[in-house]
Amino acid sequence: MACLIFVSPLASPISASAEETITGVYSIQNAVEDYRGTRSFEISRNQYQEYVITADRSFESVAYYDAEHHELFCVIETAHQYNTLMKFRIEGGALTVYSLYSEKWNEYPGVDKK
């Protein structure tokens, strides 16, 4: 289960001291026209300068940024019977999406590009 998202150099900065940029909207490239699931992810900052991850047609959640590992973490509170811990890893200008299931990080399928 992996979503690979490439980050554009035109994205907004994480913080004044950080060189890497991650904010922006990332669209799933391989979503078919009638796909009803998540088509895009948006990483932004709210009025409190917290990171917010919004998944189209799915969730919006405040995220914690681990600067040492270049990863964002958030919990999806869904209408389902459980919450899901999500991880967004930033490496070499690419963002990969994971969910924690049965004590294992599972990559989301598909490649996303800004």
Image (cartoon, rainbow, N blue to C red):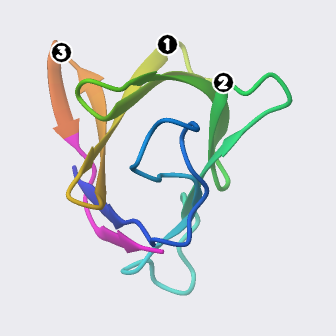
Tell me the residue that label 1 is attached to. 82
Task: Determine the secondary structure under disc 2.
Answer: loop
**Looking at the image, residue 36 lies above or below residue 13:** below
**N-term mark: 2 or 3:** 2
What's the residue at 86%, 29% (across, down)? 47
Magenta-colored span:
107-114
Q: Image quarter for residue 100? A: top left
Q: Is residue 73 left or right of residue 94?
A: right
**x and y percent of residue 41 in the render?**
55, 55
What is the C-alpha distance between the residues marked 1 and 3? 13 Å
Please give the residue where the numbered disc 3 appears in the rendered image: 102
Label 2 and label 1: CA atoms lie apart by 8 Å
Given the image, on which type of amino acid does mark 2 rest?
A: Ala
Magenta span includes 108: yes
Q: Which residue is mark 2?
A: 79
Observer-nearest residue: 35 or 13?
Answer: 13
The answer to whether residue 53 is above or below residue 13 is above
Expressed as whole percent of the image width and height from the top left, the position of residue 30 reads 36, 80
Q: Residue at x 46, y 83 (%)?
A: 32
Residue type at mark 3 is Ser
Between 107 and 96, which is closer to the camera in this rendering? 96
Amino acid type of the residue tagged 1 in the rendering: Tyr
The image position of residue 50, as x and y in percent, is: 68, 25
Crowd rating for badge 1 (residues with CA inside 10 Å; few <14, some 14–19, many 20+): few
**In the depicted structure, whether residue 90 falls above or below residue 61:** below
Where is residue 12? Give x, y as percent: 61, 56
Left or right of residue 65: residue 5: left
Question: In what element is the residue under mark 3?
Answer: loop
